Image (cartoon, rainbow, N blue to C red):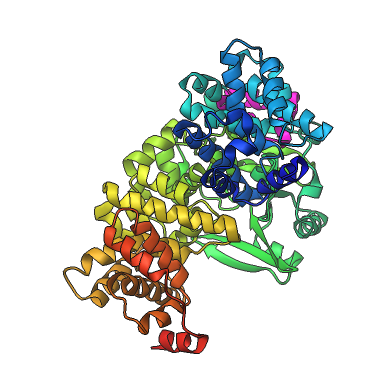
């Protein structure tokens, strides 16, 4: 293969979302020494393979979430070659000498355009600089570098296997660098730091960051949300963009969830938007409009929750007043500090009353006040915190960590079935099922969402199977861009059904398991039937194989999902492994016969 062709093919691997699968193919076919000559003496070692699995797994997860490749195209090659540079440095060469030698050796098979080599060198230099941790020079300039995200990911990966790098990785994590948007401004960082000190002392403190400092552009907002805000402003109201959209845009991510808060009650909002719909939560009413298919939430500004009156760090307020003109007071009903950020649509200022910008920069999840009081008032904050921890790797604050460790199951029990369904889907889908399971396993809270698995929360074999199933789901998501909550939850429930079926009829075991699941999980129309079909199919794949009937089973709409569950079970179950091999030989029957089988 020509060097230019190899270069192009490797570049494509970074844009697919399954770079790890491509790497494994190179390994399995014994071509790694030819593709990456500088690492030919270590490329088959277990340590190197574990490092590359982690490095490319991080790339694939980022791609599945954002459809970007860690902001840089040379990540794949840099990850593969950096261990060879470290080897040269340990032999006494300087970094520049080591990098030149490794890249020259690689250049014998890999074609560099001049700019490609220069860019690869810059990424490798950034990786070397970050590994110096607090000794690195010009640290603030690193934050805005296009190479930072890729280099930081490589450093964190390397630190998992090299203890001497963990201090440097921890340094950059604590600095919160890598976030884009507001944090590129030195003045903004100064204001955030000063405000954080005030919040720590008083419990809250107002921070207003002007447009000239924060640099967040209105063009980042939804045009429909901007149009709605302009109509409310024209009607004489104060209007704020709030919540997750501001959080994501500040952190340099895109958002499609734009909510507005306005100092107007439901009737006043209806005078501006005659088609506005409202739903009630207790005494509060929350409105929304639909424009060009996009839902824009429009809520009145509400007061500090009466339950917070008298708590340390809570300002004085009239607990009898429901609505308010104060963005500050409304902010106290938000669940986490990073979700309590406001963008003033009149002044273009960013408002922060709880150190949310500091927490976002540092990657910390925290409640606005006493964690137990906050979680009792907004129990959804518990599962949202766990979801952010799973998806972004953010640690919890000390008080939030303690509250969830001690009483997490009690807080999740306060969620309605529809809330459990919504948050479970958000937590386990989009290619993050394995990360979500790991967090729920760590906090022993999986049974709070799925009561039937309660007896298995300390079972090593259950979670080894479940982790494999979630990994398979994430792989399918990366390859196809979609995943199935039905497969994910059926995978988690199958061992329960299977164990119960040993002592009673399978249909009775299935019904009991789904009845218990329905206590916490809000099945929607036809959803329970989907679970039943998938679990019945899994029972068929496990318990019987009859020539003639097998072809009809293989034509089932859920056959592929059932085979994935069987594949996960085959990891430790010899019978499942035998059945998996057998079913892989079966060709599905023609569509008509398959439809007949499903109807039966």
Extreme-top residue of the structure:
92
Instruction: Please state the total of marks drawn on the protein image.
Output: 0
Query: Quarter holding the N terminus?
Result: top right
The image shows residue 577, relative to residue 126, as above or below, that is below
- For the point 35% across and 39% down, the residue is 405
Q: Position of residue 444 (x, y in %)?
A: 33, 46
Q: Nearer the viewer, residue 19 or 106?
A: 106
Q: Position of residue 284 (x, y in %)?
A: 55, 59
- For the point 74% across and 33% down, the residue is 146
Q: Can residue 193 be seen here?
A: yes
Query: Quarter holding the C terminus?
Result: bottom left
Q: Quadrant of residue 184?
A: top right
Q: Nearer the viewer, residue 223 or 287?
A: 223
Q: Quadrant of residue 6?
A: top right
- For the point 45% across and 49% down, the residue is 434
Please provide the residue range marked out in magenta.
172-197
Q: Nearer the viewer, residue 219 or 533?
A: 533
Q: Is 192 a magenta residue?
A: yes
Extreme-left residue of the structure:
503
The image shows residue 311, relative to residue 469, as above or below, that is above
The image shows residue 95, relative to residue 71, as above or below, that is above
Q: Position of residue 140 (x, y in %)?
A: 71, 22
Q: Position of residue 222 (x, y in %)?
A: 75, 55
Q: Can residue 189 be seen here?
A: no
Left or right of 454 on screen, residue 250: right
- For the point 47% across and 40% down, the residue is 309
Q: Is 168 a magenta residue?
A: no
């Amino acid at each position: 293969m020509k060097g230019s062709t190899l270069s192009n093919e490797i570049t494509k691997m970074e844009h697919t979302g399954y770079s790890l699968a491509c790497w494994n193919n190179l390994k399995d076919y014994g071509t790694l020494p030819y593709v990456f000559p500088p690492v030919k003496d270590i490329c088959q070692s277990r340590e190197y393979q574990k490092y590359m699995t982690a490095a490319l797994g991080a790339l694939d997860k980022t791609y599945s979430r954002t459809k970007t490749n860690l902001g840089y195209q040379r990540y794949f090659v840099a990850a593969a070659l950096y261990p060879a540079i470290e080897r040269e440095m340990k032999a006494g060469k300087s970094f520049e000498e080591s990098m030149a030698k490794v890249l020259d050796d690689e250049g014998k098979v890999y074609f560099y355009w001049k700019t490609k080599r220069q860019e690869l060198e810059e990424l490798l230099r950034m990786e070397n600089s970050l590994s110096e941790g607090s000794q690195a020079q010009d640290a603030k300039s690193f934050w805005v570098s296009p190479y930072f995200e890729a280099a930081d990911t490589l450093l964190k990966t390397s630190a998992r296997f090299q203890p001497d790098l963990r201090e440097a990785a921890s340094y950059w994590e604590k600095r919160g660098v890598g976030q884009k948007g507001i944090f590129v401004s030195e003045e903004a960082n100064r204001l955030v730091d000063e405000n954080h000190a005030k919040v720590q002392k008083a419990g809250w403190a107002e921070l207003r960051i002007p447009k000239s400092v924060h640099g967040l552009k209105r063009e980042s907002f939804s045009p429909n949300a901007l149009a709605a805000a302009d109509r409310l402003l024209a009607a004489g109201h104060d209007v704020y963009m709030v919540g997750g959209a501001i959080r994501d845009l500040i952190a340099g991510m895109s958002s499609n969830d734009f909510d507005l808060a306005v100092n107007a009650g439901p009737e006043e909002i209806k005078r501006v938007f005659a088609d506005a719909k409202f739903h009630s939560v207790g005494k509060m009413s929350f409105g929304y409009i639909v424009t060009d298919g996009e839902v824009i939430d429009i809520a009145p500004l509400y007061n500090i929750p009466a339950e917070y009156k008298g708590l340390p760090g809570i300002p004085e307020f009239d607990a009898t007043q429901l609505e308010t003109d104060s963005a500050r007071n409304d902010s106290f009903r938000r669940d986490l500090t990073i979700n309590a950020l406001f963008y003033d649509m009149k002044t273009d200022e960013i408002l922060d009353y709880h150190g949310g910008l500091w927490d976002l920069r540092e990657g910390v999840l925290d409640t606005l006040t006493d964690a137990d009081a906050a979680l009792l008032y907004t129990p959804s904050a518990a599962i949202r915190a766990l979801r952010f921890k799973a998806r972004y790797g953010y640690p919890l604050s000390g008080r939030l960590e303690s509250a969830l460790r001690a009483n997490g199951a009690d807080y999740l029990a306060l969620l309605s079935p529809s809330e459990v369904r919504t948050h479970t889907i958000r937590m386990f889908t989009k290619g993050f099922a394995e990360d979500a399971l790991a967090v729920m396993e760590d906090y022993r809270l999986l049974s709070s969402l799925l009561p039937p698995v309660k007896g298995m929360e300390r079972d090593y074999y259950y979670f080894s199977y479940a982790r494999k199933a979630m990994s398979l789901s994430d792989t399918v998501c990366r390859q196809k861009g979609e995943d199935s909550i039905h497969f994910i939850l059926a995978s988690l429930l199958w061992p329960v059904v299977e164990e119960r079926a040993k002592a009673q009829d399978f249909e009775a075991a299935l019904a009991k398991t789904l009845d218990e699941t329905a206590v916490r999980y809000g099945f929607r129309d036809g959803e329970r039937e989907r679970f039943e079909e998938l679990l019945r199919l899994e029972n068929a794949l496990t318990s019987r194989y009859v020539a003639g009937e097998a072809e009809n089973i293989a034509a089932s709409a859920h056959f592929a999902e059932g085979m994935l569950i069987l594949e996960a079970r085959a990891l430790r179950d010899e019978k499942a492994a035998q059945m998996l091999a057998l079913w892989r030989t079966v060709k599905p029957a023609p569509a008509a016969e398959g439809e007949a089988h499903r109807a039966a």
